[in-house]
Image: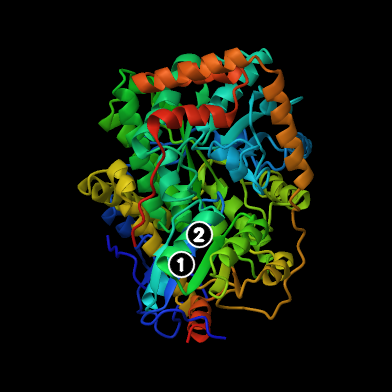
């Protein structure tokens, strides 16, 4: 599958969905992706789905990444999926990381998440996944 | 002293120390080199025993009380709250029945950032990571049947802390408690919230002004209440090393102190009510030295810099026992062992209160079984292990005393660095401190991934494991709906004019820059909602715009 939309460097959006403020993981991933040579846009905290979809559109990113630590990701991703479809962004690589209980993972795959990276994932796994899928 | 900034280091823990080449230096996480053996000469070279003193006496290195746990063991205060106030009230009572001696209230995210349960932004978040609170009525339900003189309550809330403190005081007053005698704590440390945890609402300046309002209000109206618990804890969770954790906590506590002093209060009128919350994971001796050093440094600051004369103003009271970053999702039973060591470290360090991590919290809201196991862990230490027999049992160890001196020096260096960079308020507002600790967190994870920094189950002694079976805390949609209904019923039956008048007064007081706590108390008593009061303040203060730096 080819998720690459733009020429040049791969552009990745990292967003913090919902109201949770634990951003250690999101910021670590941002740094790792920058070090891996990607262009990274970080939204900061408390992004509603509408904001994430809008930034993804404006920045024309190749990858939309969410960092969820407080459990509200399933309903959030359902809503975000509708918005991404509306904006014609459902062909972009869509990934999520953080505190993702195993029983939520199937639901997220069904919604359309391409990659799920629970806490404890090695950083290079995320980098490799993006590189492979965006070639 | 040999110190080094965070770089790949040789480790203090077992697995990766190079036992073939023992000439390799070993450093602790704060960057202090650890020798193979300590003698009286090392202690002398580090500054000797001048700052050791006696328990209960300045500079309180050995503890803030003369008899410590011999007289009364630490307060056991597990962090709890979920669903609606009825659910939380039940869990509180379960913990009290199992021997818990204080409460530590978790709020859901909408309550923490000033959003009502019927706001669209709260969808999916109501009651998820803590108890949902919309009005004074919820406090009345949550604490129903709990004796607030026997059980002290700590409110883990920051952005909306002024409102939640007012709700607690109003609820206690309604139940006939004398505010002059009421004890309890609120976290209410907004500066650390900008660095880690992230439940800010207003810009930095009005946010710290609100903290000063609560300190001033409590000093005058509820003098035994602790309105602030300064948290090095979350700064450490965000990537700070143990010496930085304490140093950043102290510069933050000083920032609040300066604001309150500027209002004309005397340091002895409020300093004794400032408390602290610190992290516990990591090297045992580094943590014990950190707390012993921190106690004496804080005492020295309050006495020498601020001129306090009452020894009670100088004591560093703290809650410790948590350290989520130290736990692992892999082999979760190992977290039970880690938790037991956390409790041991807290006890050896002279903590006043423990909120021990539960083994399942890398996954979920802790189950009743996990909470009980944490309580039993502390009770075993108290009843069976002799931790309460004598005060500061590690005192006099060449290693611990030397390290205590070195950690104190290191903390002073870090505090001086913050001053050189314009102070903590400026660094937080500009995002420079956030960027610094986040860079360290990244570096640490790289070291863990490379195996440089050993972590059992992660980079050594791994096992092929199935996703382990743990009991997940379910999200209760029904409870969320119940909470919304309760709020809507309240909106229908309360005295609307009283709500509007008190909210208008709150806006006026905020605009004029006077202490807003009396106006918040009045609005709370009129059953104004958390969201309404927050919006009133936002209309004057605006909202924080997060600086993002890498």
Q: Is residue B255 above or below residue B458?
A: above
- Cα gap from disc 2 to disc 1, whole angstroms: 9 Å
* B197 or B384, nearer to the observer: B197
Q: Residue at x 30, y 58 (%)?
A: B41
- The quadrant the C terminus of chain B occupies is bottom left
Residue, disc 2: A52
Q: Residue at x 47, y 87 (%)?
A: A135
Residue, disc 1: A13
| SS for callout 1 | strand
Q: Give residue B137's quadrant in the image.
A: top right
Q: Chain of mark 2?
A: A
Q: Is residue A85 above or below residue B163?
A: below
Residue B106: percent from left, percent from top: 62, 41
Residue B171: percent from left, percent from top: 64, 20
Name the side, left or right, on which B24 lies relative to B274: left
Label 1 crowding class (10 Å Cα cut-off): few <14, some 14-19, many 20+? many
- The quadrant the N terminus of chain B occupies is bottom left
Mark 2 or mark 1: which is in front?
A: 2
Residue B325: percent from left, percent from top: 54, 59
Mark 1 and mark 2 in contact (Cβ < 8 Å)? yes
* Count of numbered badges drawn on the protein: 2
* B450 or B395, nearer to the observer: B450
Mark 2 vs 1, N-terminal side = 1
Residue A99: percent from left, percent from top: 61, 62
């Amino acid at each position: 599958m080819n998720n690459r939309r733009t020429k040049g460097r791969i552009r990745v959006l990292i967003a913090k969905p919902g109201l949770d403020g634990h951003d250690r993981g999101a910021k670590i991933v941002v740094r790792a992706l920058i070090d891996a040579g990607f262009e990274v846009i970080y939204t900061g905290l408390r992004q509603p789905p509408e904001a994430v979809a809008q930034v993804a559109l404006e920045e024309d990113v190749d990858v939309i990444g969410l960092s969820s630590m407080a459990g509200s990701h399933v309903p959030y991703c359902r809503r975000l999926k509708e918005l991404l479809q509306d904006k014609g962004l459902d062909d972009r690589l869509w990934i999520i990381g953080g505190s993702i209980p195993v029983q939520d993972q199937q639901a997220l795959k069904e919604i359309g998440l391409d990659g799920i990276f629970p806490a404890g994932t090695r950083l290079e796994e995320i980098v490799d996944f993006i590189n492979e899928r965006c070639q | 002293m040999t110190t080094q900034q965070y770089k790949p280091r040789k480790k203090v823990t077992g697995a990766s120390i190079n036992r073939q080449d023992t000439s390799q230096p070993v450093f602790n996480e704060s960057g202090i080199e650890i020798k193979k053996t300590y003698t009286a000469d090392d202690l002398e070279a580090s500054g000797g025993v001048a700052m050791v003193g006696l328990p209960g006496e300045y500079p309180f290195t050995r503890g803030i009380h003369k008899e410590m746990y011999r007289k009364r063991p630490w307060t056991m205060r597990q962090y709890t709250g979920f669903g609606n106030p009825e659910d939380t009230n039940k869990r509180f009572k379960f913990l009290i029945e199992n021997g818990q001696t204080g409460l530590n209230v978790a709020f859901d995210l909408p309550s923490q950032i000033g959003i009502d349960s019927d706001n669209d932004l709260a969808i999916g978040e109501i009651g998820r990571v803590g108890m949902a609170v919309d009005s004074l009525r919820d406090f009345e339900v949550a604490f129903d049947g709990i004796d607030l003189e026997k059980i002290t309550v700590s409110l883990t809330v920051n952005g909306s802390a002024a409102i939640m403190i007012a709700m607690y005081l109003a609820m206690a007053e309604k139940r006939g408690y004398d505010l002059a005698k009421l004890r309890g704590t609120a976290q209410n440390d907004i500066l650390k919230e900008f660095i880690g945890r992230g439940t800010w609402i207003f810009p930095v300046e009005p946010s710290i002004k609100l903290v000063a309002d609560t300190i001033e209000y409590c000093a005058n109206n509820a003098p035994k209440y602790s309105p602030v618990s300064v948290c090095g804890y979350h700064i450490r969770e965000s990537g700070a090393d143990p010496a930085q954790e304490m140093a950043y906590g102290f510069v933050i506590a000083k920032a609040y102190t300066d604001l309150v002093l500027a209002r004309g209060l005397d340091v002895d009128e409020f300093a004794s009510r400032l408390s602290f919350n610190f992290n516990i994971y990591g090297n045992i001796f580094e943590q014990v030295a950190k707390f012993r050093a921190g106690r004496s440094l804080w005492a020295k600051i309050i006495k020498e810099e601020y001129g306090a004369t009452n020894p009670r103003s100088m004591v560093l009271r703290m809650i410790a026992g948590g350290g989520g970053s130290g736990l692992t999702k892999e082999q979760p039973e190992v977290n039970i062992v880690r938790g037991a060591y956390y409790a041991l470290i807290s006890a050896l360090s002279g903590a006043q209160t423990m909120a021990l991590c539960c083994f399942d919290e890398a996954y979920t809201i802790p189950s009743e079984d996990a909470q009980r196991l944490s309580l039993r862990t502390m009770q075993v230490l108290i009843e069976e292990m002799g931790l309460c027999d004598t005060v500061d049992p590690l005192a006099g160890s060449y290693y611990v005393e030397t390290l205590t001196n070195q950690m104190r020096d290191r903390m002073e260096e870090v505090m001086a660095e913050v001053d050189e960079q314009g102070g903590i308020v400026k660094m937080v507002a500009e995002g420079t401190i956030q960027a610094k600790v986040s860079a360290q967190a990244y570096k640490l994870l790289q070291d863990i991934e490379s195996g440089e920094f050993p972590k059992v189950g992660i980079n050594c002694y791994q096992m092929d494991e199935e996703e382990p079976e743990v009991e997940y805390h379910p999200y209760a949609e029904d409870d969320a709906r119940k909470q919304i209904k309760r709020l809507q019923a309240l909106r229908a039956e309360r005295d609307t004019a009283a709500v509007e008048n008190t909210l208008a007064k709150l806006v006026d007081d905020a605009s004029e820059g006077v202490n807003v706590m009396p106006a918040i108390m009045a609005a709370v008593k009129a059953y104004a909602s958390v969201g309404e009061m927050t919006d009133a303040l936002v209309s004057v203060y605006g909202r924080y715009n997060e600086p993002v730096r890498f």
